Amino acid sequence: MHESPEPGTPRLAPLGLGLAALGRPAYITAGRGESLGDDRSVEAMRSRAHAMLDAAWARGIRFVDAARSYGRAEEFLGSWLAAHPERRAELAVESKWGYAYVGDWRMDADVHERKEHSLAVLERQWPETLTALGGPPDRYLVHSLTPESPALADEALLDRLRELAASGISIGISTSGPHQADALDAARVLPDSPFGTVQATWNLLEPSAGPALARAHDAGWFVVVKEAVANGRLTPAGDDTDAAALAAADGQTLDAFALGAARAQPWADVVLSGAMTTAQLDANLASRAPGAATDAASLVELAEDPAAYWAARSARAWA
């Protein structure tokens, strides 16, 4: 359960459960084979997703993130909610549109997802989301907005998003790529912007969006952090020895250390866990801010050039 911090301890943002790795057979997270095994059938993945949702609920997590492109993540979440309708009122559900899953439930698909930020895609995917979830999400985001996205200048699309916002749904964006800050700032300053939520990548290797996230938070936006463990690079399955040494010196596992650093950011409202097992979830929940003995300069030195970070992420194998 999430508890108030002791006086004098850093405030930590609560964890949410992200379903990116639980809704489809293949993804780019390191260590998937060890976590999921060889059975990636729809039935096995549904059972895994339901078990993780049960575990998250039992541990006090009340924020769940999905997307149209996460295979059957919305469907798995919707069937879990249908089995536990009394939980819906306490749960914040976030989903995203703008990418479609096209992997045909294959591990070796040439293309797993396809991006298009158009009014036609929104009008197709919004009812799909409603059907899969059994009702509207609380937050609905444009998936992976970049500065060049047509969504920022398509007035018909923006008007439709304003209509959804007027119905009580928090409309927002998720960001990806080396220019996350530019995309977020552009969305924030749009005249009559429909947006009020952002989900962005921030981690010890790629913290460049931090100042823009602080600006959004100061403007009243709800800030969700994704990929705090860098798609598994900042976990025991990863290979970042410098970060691992800092974590060990701080008495934490690497994933807990990385998540704790994200949760300690003053502008973070929720930090997503991409846990695939209950052991991973428990390790994530044990995360705390890096201790006072951790050298701040050493944390800064972990950061990579954003362009190099995102190029390496794009080259990761789906497994």
Image (cartoon, rainbow, N blue to C red):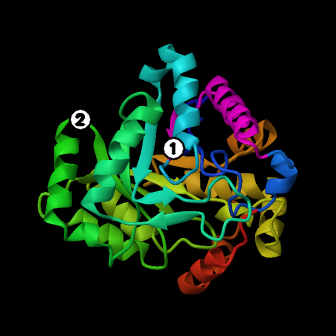
Q: Is 197 colored magenta in this rendering? A: no
Residue on which the image places disc 2: 168
State the CA–CA distance, disc 1 to disc 2: 18 Å
Dots 1, 2 in contact, CB < 8 A: no
Q: Which one is in front, 46 or 200?
A: 46
The residue carrying pointer 1 sits among few (fewer than 14), some (14 to 19) or many (20 or more) residues within 10 Å by Cα, namely many
* Magenta highlight on residue 41: yes
Residue 288 point in image, percent of width and height: 67, 48
Residue 97 falls left or right of residue 177: left
Q: Residue at x 54, y 71 (%)?
A: 207
Outermost residue on the front side: it is 104
Which of the marked residues, 1 or 2, is nearer the chain's N terminus? Answer: 1
Q: On residue 314, which mark appears?
A: none
Q: Residue furthest top?
A: 86
Query: In the image, 14: left or right of 279?
Result: left
Q: Magenta: predominant secondary structure element?
A: helix
Image quarter in which the N terminus is found: top right
Residue 295 position (above or below residue 21): below
Magenta stretch, residue numbers: 40-66
Q: Secondary structure at mark 1?
A: strand
Query: For the point 65% across and 54% down, which residue is it?
Result: 259
